[in-house]
Image: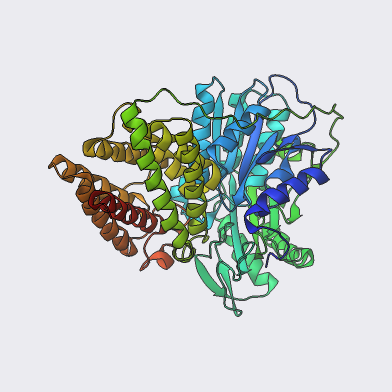
Amino acid sequence: MTSIFDEPERFAATALAGFCDVHSHLVHGLRGGALRASQTPEGKVALVIGGGSGHYPAFAGYVGAGLADAAVAGDVFASPSTESVARICRQAHRGGGIVLGFGNYAGDVLNFGAAAERLRGEGIDVRILAVTDDVASAPPTEKSKRRGVAGDIPVFKIAGAAAEAGLSLDEVERLARLANARTVSLGVAYSGCTLPGADAPLFTVDPSKLAVGLGIHGEPGVRDEPRMPAAKLAELLVAPLLAERPDGASGRVAVLLNGLGATKYEELFVLWTQVAEGLRAGGLEPVAPEVGELVTSLDMAGCSLTLTWLDEELEPLWLAPAETAAFRRGQVAPAARAPKPAEDAEETPRFAPAGEPSREAAARVQALLETMARALAAAEDELGRIDAIAGDGDHGQGMRRGSAAAVEGGRAALALGAGAGSLLAHAGDRWADTAGGTSGAIWGLMLRAFGTALGDEEKPGAADVAAGARAGLEAVTALGRARLGDKTLVDALVPFVEALERETGAGRDLPSAWATAAEAATRAAEATKDLAPRLGRARPLAAKSLGHPDAGAVSLALIARSLAEALRGEATGA
């Protein structure tokens, strides 16, 4: 288990600070990430990579000449926030545009995607690169739904070498997408990993078995197999990857045999002898293979195998020089050290002038935010338990932290005279920036859209609140792409919004309408137990998810009920 830490909630930030201090000759430490320390020419394409912490050497270990220009680090197994991604991208940008690389997980898709939209609005050309190499998480006909696991590394290496060579943004993007399309991975685990401060792993594996098709965020495998010797394990890993050989592939492959955190290098070398034999028997020639810890999952015991089918364009980029803390190849030309950029201090937020009725309503909104935060803090363990069935178990923690940050943001806005809409929008931003991950991004989007719809002039009426709820739903579905039946928060949010609109449209007061909508959300959340997930980390584990409700839907219904009670209390004076 993860044994060395002070405050569990500071584990990721403290680990990042230590890494940046040890490798200060290669990286500048930034709030929430790391920036290449060597000078890069103006006009160079910047490769910015990132994701949750807990995967070292991914992602900060790959910042340096010939690879990434910067890395953004979220909390353990949680996507970095939109604000962090955008801020670090601005530091890395040299005028040539940015390629944003990350594994294909819902939280990363939301936060990196929202950051790209912000940056494009500032005139920076940003291209999105979501790595999709895990063959266990979707069939070949649905490659866009596959997770990114250790295939991140060859894809990022090829993209970084293309950028280092001075190629255009269009060319770097094209080559990175080509590498991603020709990269496949499969992993196995012998035990789950334990989050800092937790007293049990996120999942367990029967000692007589191994889990096949695991994720790198503490998700269990998609099936179990009996334990087997190295020769059989190599066959289990190699065969599915060989089956995805692209038409016309030469047979030359970049190969990664990756340890997940608690598997000894000697074990990997034993396995390599069998893997190499299986690859060569299949007519493949490993090119500069890498064996070791490349993308880990805290203290998980297990390994993964990755192949990238090389061609005349990709092979020179795979072999090109690079110098990072975790990946060195060839001789990198010396470069002057760049000064560490000054980081923007956290500014006092500014709000547009608000009407007195809206400022009075803001105090009421703040009280409701505090009610929400108390309810989520009390439910943290139960929400984590539900999430751990087919996910990584951090939903309760993320919701508690996010809502607490929203409360602090609301207090600051209230003290500065913000109206109800601006207070809610600022609280959403604070939620997203603190919690990160999928739920952080969703609730940040939802509260900001809700607040924007309310505005800062008048006291919101019941119909205005229903319109705000509709705006929140539309914001979430537009960027997150979830729909009814996908087994997500949306399955509870849609009936909530529809009931609220129906009841307020019929003239019912807000406390009554909200209570009815909360009941609809609660029924819908419970009904998600009969759904198979079609999006997010739980999707590859559909069988394990059946019979259990979705954690995001459950937490939304919990919030709706807690606010219904608060609104009822206001109405009755209780």
- Residue 333 pos. (x, y %): 85, 30
Q: Residue at horizontal 84%, vertical 34%?
A: 332
Asked whether 36 or 522 is in front, the reply is: 522
Residue 22, percent across and down?
A: 82, 46
Q: Is residue 557 left or right of residue 108?
A: left
Give the residue at the far bottom of this rendering.
208
Q: Residue 111: percent from the left, percent from the top?
A: 51, 40
Q: State the residue in front, 417 or 87.
A: 417
Picture coordinates of residue 285 (x, y %)?
72, 51
Q: Is residue 562 left or right of residue 537?
A: left
Quadrant the C terminus occupies: bottom left
Residue 452, picture quadrant = top left
Residue that sits furthest to the front in the current view:
573
Residue at 45 percent across and 66 percent down: it is 382
The quarter of the rendered structure image containing the N terminus is bottom right
Q: In which image quadrant can residue 364 be found?
A: top left
Would you place residue 5 above or below residue 246 in this image?
below
